[in-house]
């Protein structure tokens, strides 16, 4: 690797098992989740999630070694990392577009767009939200979570600016507050799910609600782990004002999560709670 660095500023990545193992882990977790949703037990799902977490730990360890030990993240390599993170977030945007599409497809013309839903018209009642669905109050826990998540975005920006100004103590404090707010958000979401009046299999409303907000919640948990790794690295002095893309990538991801939640709150928790035919 040192020979490569001496000849050019690019990073030739060493062979790694983590892309293949990560794909296998995601497959096991997804398969286990499907079985779990069909009351077939959760062991496979837990094994898959353990594999995913192990992949995250090992892959992060290798990337940190590349940056801190091998010094492989040259300015040109960092440009490539930025492009990669931007494209990843763009793919995540399209992922959530699918769930918003499903929500609006069902809610704008309830019971009118497919033979399956037409057959269930009496259940939907031709209105949205469907008859019998008691929606969550917009201005209670959903609004509280909106305030929590937007505040976490502000504290993360505080941490980022403190880091760029060389104030590591303030950056650490801002990051700790952001992580605590992220944990609060997830806790409120779990409480909300526990007290919701409809289950996942309760119809089209509950399906799109839990899929959209549930996948967002999964991204919040992943983002929280990302921020915790950044906190550990910051305490070890890995980040400097001019060399901290790992932290910057976490900030991009977290702000993406913030924006998605704003759309969820406006579309599902607010507009989606207004009865319409």
Image: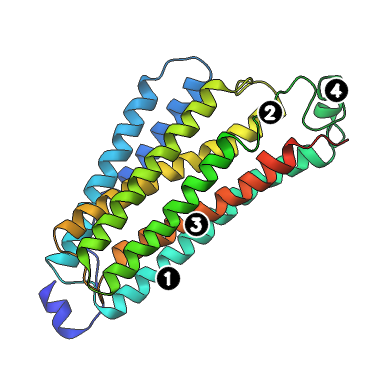
Residue 206 image offset from top left, x and y in percent: 65, 28
Foreground label between 3 and 2: 2
For disc 1, the marked residue is 83
- Residue drawn at x 24%, y 77% is 74
Please give the label number shown on residue 256: 3
Q: Circles 1 and 2: CB distance less than 8 Å? A: no
Work out whether mark 1 precedes mark 2 in sequence or the reverse, and give the earlier one: 1
Foreground label between 1 and 2: 2
Give whichever of 251, 105 is nearer the camera. 251
Work out whether mark 4 precedes mark 2 in sequence or the reverse, and give the earlier one: 4
Q: CA distance from mark 1 to mark 2?
A: 40 Å
Q: Can residue 119 be seen at all in this image of the molecule?
A: yes
| Relative height, residue 171 to residue 1 (above, below) | above
Relative placement, left or right, of 134 versus 83 is: right
Please give the label number shown on residue 164: none
Helix, strand or loop at disc 2? loop
Q: CA distance from mark 1 to mark 3?
A: 15 Å
Q: CA distance from mark 3 to mark 2?
A: 26 Å
Colour option used = rainbow
Is the N terminus in the top left, top right, bottom left or bottom right quadrant?
bottom left
- Quick one: which residue is furthest to the bottom in this view? 7
Q: Can residue 102 be seen at all in this image of the molecule?
A: no
- Residue drawn at x 87%, y 20% is 122
Helix, strand or loop at disc 1? helix
């Amino acid at each position: 690797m040192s020979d490569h660095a001496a000849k050019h500023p690019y990073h030739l990545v060493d062979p790694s098992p983590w892309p293949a193992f990560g794909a296998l882990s995601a497959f096991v977790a997804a398969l286990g989740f499907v079985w779990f949703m069909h009351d077939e037990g959760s062991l496979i799902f837990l094994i898959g999630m353990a594999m995913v977490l192990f992949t995250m730990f090992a892959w992060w360890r290798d990337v940190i070694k590349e940056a801190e030990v091998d010094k492989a993240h040259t300015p040109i390599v960092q440009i490539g990392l930025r492009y990669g993170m931007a494209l990843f977030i763009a793919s995540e945007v399209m992922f959530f577009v699918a769930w918003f599409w499903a929500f609006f497809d069902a809610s704008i013309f309830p019971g009118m767009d497919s033979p399956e839903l037409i057959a269930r018209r009496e259940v939907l009642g031709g209105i949205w939200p469907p008859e019998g669905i008691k929606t969550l109050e917009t201005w209670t826990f959903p609004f509280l979570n909106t305030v929590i998540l937007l505040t976490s975005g502000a504290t993360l920006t505080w941490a980022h600016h403190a880091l760029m100004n060389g104030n590591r103590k303030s950056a650490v404090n801002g990051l700790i507050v952001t992580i605590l707010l992220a944990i609060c958000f997830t806790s409120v979401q779990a409480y909300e799910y526990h007290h919701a009046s409809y289950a996942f299999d309760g119809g089209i409303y509950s399906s799109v609600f839990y899929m959209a907000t549930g996948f967002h919640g999964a991204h919040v948990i992943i983002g929280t782990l990302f921020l915790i790794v950044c906190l550990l690295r910051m305490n070890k002095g890995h980040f400097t004002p001019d060399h901290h893309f790992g932290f910057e990538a976490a900030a991009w991801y977290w702000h993406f999560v913030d924006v998605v939640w704003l759309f969820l709150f406006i579309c599902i928790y607010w507009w989606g709670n207004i009865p319409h035919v």
